[in-house]
Image (tube, rainbow, N blue to C red):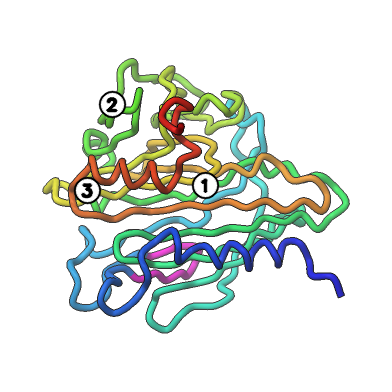
Amino acid sequence: MKPRSDVVAFVLLAAVIAASCPARGAESSRLRVSWADNMLTIEATAGQPQVPGGKLLIHYLEAYCRPGSKERDWRETVIGHSTRLVSAAADGGEIALECRLADGVVVRHKIVAQSDCVDFQLVAHNPTQVASQAHWAQPCIRVGPFTSRQEETYLPLCFVLVDGKVTKLPTEPWAREARYVPGQVYCPAHVDRADVNPRPLSKIVPSHGLIGCFSSDAKWIMASAWQPYQELFQGVITCVHSDFRLGGLEPGQTKQIRGRVYVTRDDIASLVKRYERDFPEHLPPAKNR
């Protein structure tokens, strides 16, 4: 029997995780992951320095979305989905999830905790005879406890990269008008500006796909990136997003997506260099040569 293409792709993705993140083990593992009620939890293992706020919560996943979302009612953009836990390692080092979309698409997630990052390897497959309009999806990272700030005060601890430089929010100019307010969306050059979150859309085009924030004591950094990515977003419930891109799936088509959440000590220059090694696709052509 010929193996299904989505299963083969998932196995191949799993094989490359070890090469992209430090090996998991008692000496190096600081983080652990768990998932319940659509919330992914990242926290420290026993005896290791605690993540600011004790743990990092991610609404995983908040939504799968159709294109043409910028000027449309949000309820018409979202594609219904359900997520189930497939497996979980007893030590919290690895979990597997499966999302089933209302249009038939199946997305498998392998999530591995490492010393100072969590690695995401996804395989999306459309087993139906109809093209899927699933163009992007939202992991919503709740950073209130990490920053020790509220909705009104956490913004200055957040950052994106503009012209290759770490740039704290609020960026200037700051967009204020949209179908839904407040918030700020940063749309990369490769994505149609009509296909992003219906929140205020910045005129600024990010140069990189990394978004993150500093802890209130400036000793820690949390940051996230995906390949491919759809948008960067500063939200309204003390959250930040690097939303990953699917771009739709034709009948029988399979796509691979990978992501990373970093939780590191405060060394922003080292983090940016590491991100650039992890996601060379995000770099301008001249820097990627």
Q: Residue at x 63, y 29 (%)?
A: 72
Q: Is residue 68 left or right of residue 272?
A: right
Q: Amino acid at mark 2?
A: Pro
Percent of width and height locating residue 182: 39, 29
Residue placed under numbered mark 2 in the picture: 170
Q: Main secondary structure of the magenta part?
A: strand
Q: In the rendered structure, which disc, 2 or 3, sits on the residue that comes first in sequence?
A: 3
Q: Answer few, some or many: residues within 10 Å of disc 3's Cα (few below 14, many 20 plus, some between 14 and 19).
A: many
The foreground one among 74 and 134 is 134
Q: Quadrant of residue 149?
A: top left
For label 1, the SS is: strand
Q: Which residues are magenta?
A: 32-41
Q: Is residue 208 left or right of residue 74?
A: left
Q: Which mark is residue 147?
A: 3
Q: Residue furthest left?
A: 217
Q: Amino acid at mark 1?
A: Gln
Q: Amino acid at mark 3?
A: Thr
Q: Residue at x 45, y 56 (%)?
A: 59
Q: Residue at x 39, y 76 (%)?
A: 92
Q: Residue at x 55, y 42 (%)?
A: 228
Q: Check if mark 1's residue and mark 3's residue have beta carbons within 8 Å.
A: no
For label 2, the SS is: loop
Q: Quadrant of residue 52?
A: bottom left
Separation of residues labelled 2 and 3 (CA atoms): 16 Å
Percent of width and height locating residue 41: 38, 65
Q: Is residue 286 visible?
A: yes
Q: Which mark is residue 247?
A: none
Separation of residues labelled 2 and 1 (CA atoms): 22 Å
Q: In the rendered structure, which disc, 2 or 1, sits on the residue that comes first in sequence?
A: 1
Q: Is residue 76 visible?
A: no
Q: Which mark is residue 138?
A: 1
